[in-house]
Image: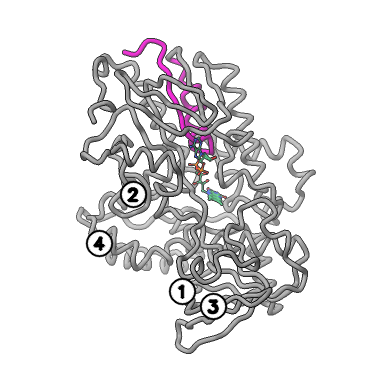
Amino acid sequence: MAVHPHIVIIGGGFTGTALAIHLGRQGRLAGDVTVIEPRAMLGCGVAYSTRDPAHRINVPADKMQLSAAEEGDFDRWCRAGDELTRDPEALWRDGSLYPQRGAFGRYIAERFSETAAASRLNLHHLRDRAISLQPVPGGAIVTTAGGVRIHADAMVLAISHPPPALPSQISQAVGQHPALIANPWQDNALAAIGTWDELVIIGTGLTMADVAASLQLRGHRGRITAFSRRGLLPRPNVTGDYPSWPVEPPLAAPETVRRWLRRIRRTVVAAADAGVPWQKVIDDVRANGQTLWQRLPPVEQRRFLRHLRPYWDVHRYRIAPQVSALLRQRRDNGTLRVLAARLDKIAGGEKDLTLQLALRQGGAERVAAQKVIISTGPAHGSLINSLPLLRALAGQGLIVADPLGLGLWVNADSQAIGSDGLADPRLLVAGPAARGRFGELIGLPQVAEHAQALATQLLALLTSPALDGRCPLSRR
Ligand SMILES: Cc1cc2nc3c(=O)[nH]c(=O)nc-3n(C[C@H](O)[C@H](O)[C@H](O)COP(=O)(O)OP(=O)(O)OC[C@H]3O[C@@H](n4cnc5c(N)ncnc54)[C@H](O)[C@@H]3O)c2cc1C
């Protein structure tokens, strides 16, 4: 058993901060928890650090919580404070709230401060960036860019969303062109866009919806062409009160994707006959997503990723009704068209870019644009390469990518699996980076549950006599 253990959480977005809060709340242990996070505020990460008022959470506020027992807490926090005065449009006509994403970050940061003030554990935010992890007996030394060295008894990697990647075809042809906006998440990325600029958005998912909403708020009125291979748009969230509608009980393993799809379709038809929208069926599939995923043999998991994922994504990741209404309005007035196409060629003029698109239904189209915005979302497939720390850990053999290329490979206890195939009980992976193993692990409820489970697991690990003398990190 570690005396006064020190847990280091690398990454203080939602996942790392939720984990620290759950550790702090369990209060059985005296020790330290340091969350290393370069951003000024904990709890925000990539999703909730946006200050753009057009970026809204994509599920009602009463579904965004730190644990199942707290359902509705964020909604109550918004209504009790001044969120609705600041942002009256958050209130949708069915009475539910879809606040700006930054509000959720502030809510989590507040819960962290409250927990830190009350906990037996010392919870700290170290505003810095971890750059290396050196195994030593009983743990590792974590070093930061600012030169701080911490002896950690256990470490958690809570880094999920790398920046979008520029397709090589584009970076080779026009990578430095001023009309190219490679990362729309950067502050002021859209500032140089003029009111009547003609735009092309590459990607038609949630990032495209964010970009279109921001452009509308900034007064952009020009034409937008958005395209992706299938041209699928994220669907709106259901508004109104409907009963949940479970898919009939799963069959015995092993399952196939095809059988599941058939079953979901049948259930959607039955729900529709009863006046219940498809969203309630998909919500049920999502709630059981981890069990379903783990029941699929690897060949079926690959089949799902290759054929079904784009369709699953647009039904499962939805958009706030405010954003959905805006997209509909722009499509109706002809300022937004969505194409199923792939990029054939791109060339730069003095000020603009011309794209040659191969349309999915056949034929080609040329589109000229004053700005081209890459909106393909986080480049999860290159998570390890996106950060020097992760590259270094991979070089040391402490982590490897999962076989499906979704993040980092872990065992069923979220312990990182190294290049020797062994899992390390002192090095855990929290949140979406572990979804190659677990399946559905990106949306808030599942990530919050994962953080809560890891808190319990870490406390058990650090109070276990079995850990004494074990030093798997230094086995390599
Ligand atoms: C744009 C977007 C919008 C979303 N909207 C919703 C929504 O409305 N509803 C919903 O349910 N889900 C939503 N999600 C999904 C969900 O909330 C996220 O999956 C979740 O926030 C995961 O966050 P994270 O903390 O694991 O990762 P990240 O957000 O990636 O945070 C990781 C943190 O690690 C830090 N970091 C990186 N490198 C280092 C280092 N070397 N040392 C220390 N720190 C480091 C980064 O600064 C970052 O803050 C959204 C996701 C995205 C990307």
Where residue 199 appears, x then y in whole percent?
Answer: 65, 72
Residue 357, relative to residue 390: is it above or below? Answer: below
**In this view of the protein, can residue 89 be seen by the observer?**
yes
Give the crowd class for mark 3: few <14, some 14-19, many >=20 residues within 10 Å.
many
Distance Cα–Cα, label 1 vs label 3: 8 Å
Distance Cα–Cα, label 2 vs label 4: 17 Å
Q: Which residue is mark 3?
A: 339
Sooner in the amino-acid sequence: mark 4 or mark 1: 1
Q: How many marks?
A: 4
User: What residue span does the magenta drawing correspond to?
Assistant: 1-28
Sooner in the amino-acid sequence: mark 1 or mark 2: 1
Q: Nearer the viewer, residue 446 or 43?
A: 43
Distance Cα–Cα, label 3 vs label 4: 31 Å
* Mark 2 vs mark 4: in front: 2
Q: Residue at image x 20%, y 53%? A: 253
Side of 453 where 329 appears, left or right: right
- Mark 3 beta carbon near ligand 1 (under 8 Å): no
Q: Identity of the amino acid at label 1?
A: Arg
Q: Nearer the viewer, residue 66 or 348?
A: 348
Q: Quadrant of residue 77?
A: top right
* Mark 3 vs mark 4: in front: 3
Give the crowd class for mark 1: few <14, some 14-19, many >=20 residues within 10 Å.
some
Give the crowd class for mark 2: few <14, some 14-19, many >=20 residues within 10 Å.
many
Where residue 361 appears, x then y in whole percent?
Answer: 45, 85
Q: Residue at image x 29%, y 60%? A: 302
Q: Which residue is mark 2?
A: 436
**In this view of the protein, can residue 69 be seen by the observer?**
no
